[in-house]
Image (cartoon, rainbow, N blue to C red):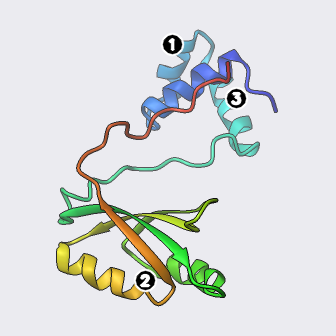
Amino acid sequence: MSVDNLNWKILKCLQENARMSNAEISRRVGVSSPAVSERIKKMEDAEIIQGYTTFVSPFKTGYQLKAIITLRAFMGMLKPFLEKVKTYDEVVNCYRITGNDNIVMEVVLKNQKHLETFIDQLISYGETRTQIVLSHVIKHSEIKPLK
């Protein structure tokens, strides 16, 4: 399925507010509500739209720290880690990457002691590096059409 100009306009609306009604989207993009609904359904079926989500503030829910942790897995420990990382509640995003490090994780933590305990769990899998996030510069930026 191709993403034409009209589909991009619909995607822009949904990326701004996933709860925007089809009627509101139709007003913004200039086609009928049923046409918007049909296009959204087709994009969902084609997995262009992969879901709808709510962004929760970790800080408003009691977490005090957000950190980026990289891991360079020890020989033979990458596969076991890739299974184990799925069980950590602290990990909100995890990427397997190229380069010297194998893994980048975005984590949320209650406090410094929680960070220390979490790192202690990771060091049996590899060498870690931790950076504390101070603020977001770009947050959930929309995906735009290729130029």
- The residue located at (49%, 72%) in the rendering is 71
Relative to residue 40, is residue 93 drawn left or right? left
Q: Which residue is mark 1?
A: 27
Q: CA distance from mark 1 to mark 2?
A: 50 Å
Task: Please tell me whether residue 32 is drawn above or below residue 81 in the rendered image.
Answer: above
Q: Residue at x 47, y 21 (%)?
A: 24
Q: Quadrant of the C terminus?
A: top right
* Along the viewing direction, whichever of 12 and 109 lies nearer the viewer: 109
Farthest top residue in view: 30
Residue 8 higher or lower than 31, as above or below: below
Measured from the top left, where is residue 132 in percent x and y?
A: 27, 60
Pointer 3 local density, CA inside 10 Å: few below 14, some 14–19, many at least 20:
some
Q: CA distance from mark 2 to mark 3?
A: 44 Å
Label 1 amino acid?
Arg
Q: Amino acid at mark 2?
A: Leu
Judged by depth in the image, the label closer to the viewer, 2 or 3, is 2
Image position, residue 19 (x, y; %): 44, 37
Out of 97 and 88, give the one closest to the viewer.
97
Amino acid tagged 3 = Arg
Q: Earlier in the sequence, mark 1 or mark 2?
A: 1
User: What residue would you read off at disc 3?
Assistant: 39
Q: Name the residue tied to disc 2.
A: 122
Bin the neighbour count of mark 2 within 10 Å (Cα to Cα): few under 14, some 14-19, many 20 and up: some
61 over 73 or under it: above or below: above
Residue drawn at x 79%, y 28% as measured from the top left: 2
